[in-house]
Image (spheres, rainbow, N blue to C red):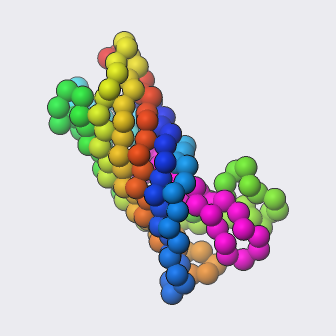
């Protein structure tokens, strides 16, 4: 199974005692790679991603609130699935917005994700779905502990080998 999704994210980030920031931002890369364990269950490596505007030290720039999360996806009905997993949060530089070596630092911490989706179109091995997902995580950053909570609305394209 291979899936990619793009959409929008409502993300809230906070660092220790500093005021929280909330934004509506693009959501990508949102990748799923895995294998079907049964006809209704998949074991996945889920890579969620949301962009947020970082206003800490140095210049204002984009960073990614991302993850590497082993997950299970289960179809409750023929076209409706739920997914959940626990893994690592990545607080990472947006690849397109790194101007110096100091801006390229990654920070990691624990993460959890829950989501659901509905398959709206099928053509052979390809499926288009609409997804909703929540992603929470935290990571140690120079300013303290950054916590992030993102709610995503996504359109996905999936390929199932052998379906």
Q: Is residue 163 above or below residue 82?
A: above
Q: What stretch is highlighted in magenta?
A: 46-70
Q: Is the magenta stretch mostly helix, strand or loop?
A: strand
Residue at image location 52% in from the left, 81% down from the top: 19
Front-most of 8 and 40?
8
Q: Position of residue 71 (x, y in %)?
A: 35, 46
Q: How many marks?
A: 0
Q: In this view, does 52 lie above or below 114?
A: below
On the image, which quarter does residue 120 sit in?
A: top left
Is residue 52 one of those drawn in magenta? yes
Front-most of 52 and 75?
52
Res. 109 visible in picture: no
Residue at the farthest top position: 124
Residue at image location 80% in from the left, 63% down from the top: 101
Q: Is residue 53 left or right of residue 139?
A: right
Residue at the farthest right position: 100
Q: In which quarter of the image is the N terminus?
A: top left
Q: Quadrant of the C terminus?
A: top left
Res. 58 visible in picture: yes
Residue at image location 58% in from the left, 61% down from the top: 52
Front-most of 5 and 71?
5
Residue at image location 38% in from the left, 23% down from the top: 127
On the image, which quarter does residue 76 sit in?
A: top left
Q: Where is residue 11 in the image (x, y as percent from the top left)?
A: 48, 61
Q: Position of residue 79 (x, y in %)?
A: 24, 28
Is residue 84 one of those drawn in magenta? no
Q: Position of residue 130 (x, y in %)?
A: 36, 36
Front-most of 41 and 19?
19
């Amino acid at each position: 199974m291979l899936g990619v999704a793009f959409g929008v994210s409502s993300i809230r980030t906070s660092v220790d005692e500093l005021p929280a920031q909330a934004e509506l931002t693009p959501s990508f890369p949102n990748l799923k790679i895995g294998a079907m364990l049964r006809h209704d269950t998949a074991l996945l490596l889920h890579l969620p991603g949301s962009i947020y505007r970082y206003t800490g030290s140095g210049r204002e720039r984009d960073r990614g609130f991302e993850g590497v999360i082993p997950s299970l996806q289960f179809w409750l009905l023929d076209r409706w699935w739920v997914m959940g997993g626990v893994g690592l949060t990545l607080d990472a530089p947006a690849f397109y917005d790194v101007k110096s070596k100091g801006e390229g630092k990654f920070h990691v911490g624990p993460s959890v994700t829950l989501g659901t989706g509905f398959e709206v179109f099928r053509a052979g091995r390809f499926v288009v779905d609409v997804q909703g997902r929540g992603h929470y995580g935290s990571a140690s950053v120079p300013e303290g502990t950054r916590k992030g909570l993102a709610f995503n609305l996504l359109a996905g394209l999936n390929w199932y080998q052998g379906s």
